[in-house]
Image: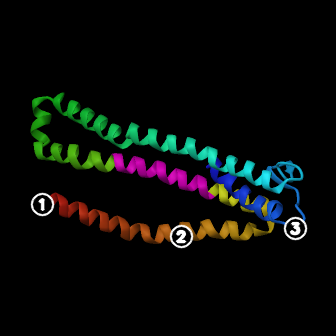
């Protein structure tokens, strides 16, 4: 998300400083004004900015690679499956007679998978909301007159989610019922 904030400022820097006939002073960090990164040399400023733009990509790529290796969803899924099965094995005879083995198998194979997917979806949703907040903060910082649009946009998004949420849940429940009937 910080990289997004940086790239938004880079775009403004390109337009207002690097490609402008009269370079203006812009702020990469609120409160700190800067003009050309290399005073008097647009080409060197563009090179420095290119390096500053590309260098974080290496770290972001490594972060993505490590997150794939960690396999958070698989780790969560395996932990939940082992915990649920361990809990089932600790049932007494009366409890085991109440819970059918097919129900436990379905919970271990299907429900745990859905729970781990839901957790990963919640993490991704937090990331998207963070990105939305950064874009909104940047827009407000550059144009305080856009406040009404900044309030209207997430409001319309929430209304859309609320209107579509019920039909989406029904479709998911129907799919789940059909899978269980098979």
Q: Is residue 98 toward the left or the right of residue 6 in the image?
A: left
Nearer the observer: mark 2 or 3; the answer is 3
Secondary structure of the residue carrying numbered label 3: loop
Q: Counting residues from the N terminus, which is met first, the one under dot 2 or under dot 3? A: 3
Residue 21's label in the rendered image is 3
Question: Looking at the image, which residue is at 88% across and 49% down?
Answer: 39
Residue 47: where, in percent of width, then height?
A: 73, 51
Residue 182's label in the rendered image is 1
Question: Looking at the image, which residue is at 64% across and 53% down?
Answer: 4
Secondary structure of the residue carrying numbered label 2: helix
Query: Is residue 104 positioned above or below 149 on the image?
Result: above
Q: Mark 2 points at which residue?
A: 159
The secondary structure making up most of the magenta span is helix
Q: Counting residues from the N terminus, which is met first, the one under dot 2 or under dot 1? A: 2
Marks 2/1: CA–CA distance: 36 Å
Q: Counting residues from the N terminus, which is met first, the one under dot 3 or under dot 1? A: 3
Name the image quarter holding the C terminus. Answer: bottom left
């Amino acid at each position: 998300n910080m990289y997004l904030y940086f790239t938004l400022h880079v775009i403004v820097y390109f337009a207002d400083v690097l490609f402008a006939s009269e370079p203006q002073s812009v702020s990469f960090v609120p409160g700190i004004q800067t003009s050309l990164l290399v005073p008097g040399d647009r080409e060197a400023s563009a090179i420095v900015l290119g390096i500053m733009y590309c260098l974080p990509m290496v770290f972001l790529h490594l972060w993505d690679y490590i997150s794939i290796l960690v396999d958070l969803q698989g780790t969560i899924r395996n932990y939940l499956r082992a915990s649920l099965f361990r809990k089932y094995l600790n049932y007494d005879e009366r409890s085991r007679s109440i819970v059918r083995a097919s129900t436990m198998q379905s919970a271990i194979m299907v429900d745990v998978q859905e729970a781990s997917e839901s957790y990963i979806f919640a993490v991704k949703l937090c990331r998207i909301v963070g990105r939305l907040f950064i874009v909104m903060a940047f827009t407000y910082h550059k144009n305080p007159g856009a406040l009404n649009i900044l309030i209207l946009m997430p409001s319309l998004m929430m209304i859309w989610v609320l209107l579509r949420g019920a039909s989406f849940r029904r479709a998911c429940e129907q799919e789940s019922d059909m899978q269980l009937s098979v």
